[in-house]
Image (cartoon, rainbow, N blue to C red):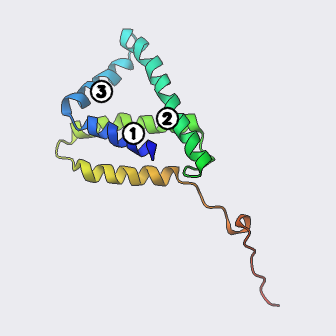
Amino acid sequence: RAILDLLRCCVEHAADPSAARLWLEILAEAGRAGPIRRDFLPFDQQSLEPLAALVTRGAAEGSIATDLDPRMTAQWLTALLDGVGARPVMEPDLDLRRWVERMELLVRRALAPVPAPASKRGVTARRRPR
């Protein structure tokens, strides 16, 4: 739930066109050598830690798949959030409310634990009569 709240909060900030444009500029500049990259990269890496901790907590609570690497999942979610900033800039008439609903659905499905096969849940297969 906390991950979805964070995503929602970021999307709300991306709805402000000037904030979204500024974020895109920062990402573009951080991709180049120079002082912005030097200052941005540690921030970017530090921002992964709390997100990875949320993934770890969700896996321990059973709400997130346990076979996901927390840090890699945090990187994937961060990449998603980086892209979130671009959509309202590229599509000013975007139905943000509906877009957020679909994004939440996709993230829930991507992180959801996979049910164990019936044989691992204690259900035994029936034998066919001979």
Q: Tell me which label, 3 or 2, sits earlier in the chain.
A: 3
Which residue appears at 25% of the width and 50% of the height? 97
What residue does disc 1 label? 6
Query: Spatial distance from mark 3 to mark 2, Cα to Cα?
Result: 19 Å
Q: Please, what secondary structure does the residue beneath circle 1 have?
A: helix
The kind of residue tagged 2 is Leu
Residue 83 placement (x, y as % from top left): 35, 37
Marks 1/3 in contact by CB < 8 Å: the verdict is no
Marks 1/2 in contact by CB < 8 Å: the verdict is yes
Query: Spatial distance from mark 1 to mark 3, Cα to Cα?
Result: 16 Å
Res 51 label: 2
The kind of residue tagged 1 is Leu
Q: Please, what secondary structure does the residue beneath circle 3 have?
A: helix
Q: Tell me which label, 1 or 2, sits earlier in the chain.
A: 1
Q: Quadrant of residue 105?
A: bottom left
Residue 38 placement (x, y as % from top left): 43, 12
**Disc 3 vs disc 2: which is toward the camera?**
2
Residue furthest out toward the right:
130
